[in-house]
């Protein structure tokens, strides 16, 4: 597992948060609230997949006020619409006693761990590192969730490992990889997991190259 918590009875907890990004006047990065929640949910879902789990419930922690709640929910629902599955039940809480100057929210998912595939695989990096405004301005470069989900379901992807703020190289080292790939900024933050390490079975590598297309490279 990456940053997941293994709970009793095979349940898995994952979470991600966002602060200073949203629709408030003092936010550092202006963005629609539904986009903020979409990317927080994206990271949290990728962490579930990294732990070989799929979420059965979602909790939203909203510190931005009541007006942001519906948009936060809409962004999470859009993520599951994108991968074309019915999303889990969403619950949560909003801070309404204190008005904050900046936006802040978090998404937590609880899921059930699945059996691990034991076939051999090689690691590939998918999606370029993007952070801040780049996430919106260069959206075509980031890892596509629908392609990853389809790859998981058809056996094309055996492992998922999202890249966070420490960059590709650090995540490679956590997996025991050298982290060698030409033409990529391996130390740059991947923001809301715009880059994802994927374990591809050895006999399906050419198929995976066709499936994921651009910004998909082997990594040592």
Image (cartoon, grey):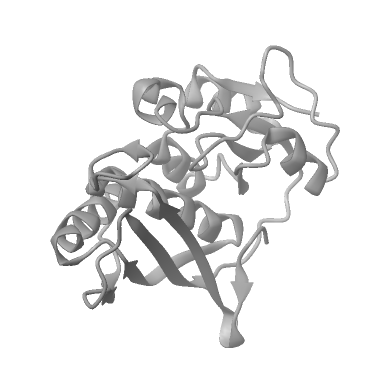
Image point 42% across, 53% down: which residue? 18
In this picture, is 94 found above or below 189? below
The quarter of the picture where the C terminus appears is top right
Residue extending furthest toward the bottom: 8
In this picture, is 57 found above or below 161? below
Most foreground residue, 54 or 116: 54
Most foreground residue, 91 or 94: 94
Residue 185, percent from left and from top: 67, 21
In this picture, is 59 found above or below 82? below
Image point 39% across, 48% down: which residue? 20
The answer to which image quadrant residue 58 occupies is: bottom left
Image point 29% across, 46% down: which residue? 22
Residue 108, percent from left and from top: 43, 68
Q: How many marks?
A: 0
Q: Is residue 191 left or right of residue 168?
A: left
Most foreground residue, 145 or 211: 145
The answer to which image quadrant residue 168 occupies is: top right
The quarter of the picture where the N terminus appears is bottom right
Most foreground residue, 81 or 116: 81
Q: Is residue 34 left or right of residue 42?
A: left
Q: Is residue 46 left or right of residue 19?
A: right
Residue 146, percent from left and from top: 37, 39
Residue 15, percent from left and from top: 49, 64
In this picture, is 58 found above or below 25? below
Image point 19% across, 58% down: which residue? 68
């Amino acid at each position: 597992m990456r940053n997941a918590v293994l709970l009793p009875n095979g349940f898995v907890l994952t979470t991600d948060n966002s602060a200073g990004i949203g629709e408030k006047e003092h936010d550092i990065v202006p963005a629609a609230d539904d986009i903020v929640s979409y990317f927080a949910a994206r990271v949290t879902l990728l962490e579930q997949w990294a732990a070989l789990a799929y979420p059965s419930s979602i909790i939203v922690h909203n510190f931005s006020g009541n007006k942001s709640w519906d948009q936060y929910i809409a962004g999470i629902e859009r993520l599951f619409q994108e991968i074309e599955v019915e999303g889990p039940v969403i619950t949560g809480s909003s801070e309404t006693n204190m008005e904050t100057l900046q936006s802040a929210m978090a998404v937590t998912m609880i899921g059930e761990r699945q059996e691990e595939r034991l076939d051999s695989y090689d690691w590939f990096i998918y999606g370029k590192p993007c952070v801040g405004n780049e996430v919106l301005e260069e959206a075509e470069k980031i890892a596509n969730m629908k392609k990853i989900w389809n790859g998981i379901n058809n056996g094309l992807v055996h492992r998922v490992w999202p890249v966070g703020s420490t960059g590709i190289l650090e995540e490679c080292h956590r997996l025991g990889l050298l982290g060698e790939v030409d033409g990529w900024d391996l130390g740059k933050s991947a923001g809301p997991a715009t880059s994802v390490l994927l374990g591809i079975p050895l006999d399906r590598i050419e198929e995976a190259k066709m499936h994921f297309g651009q910004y998909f490279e082997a990594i040592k």
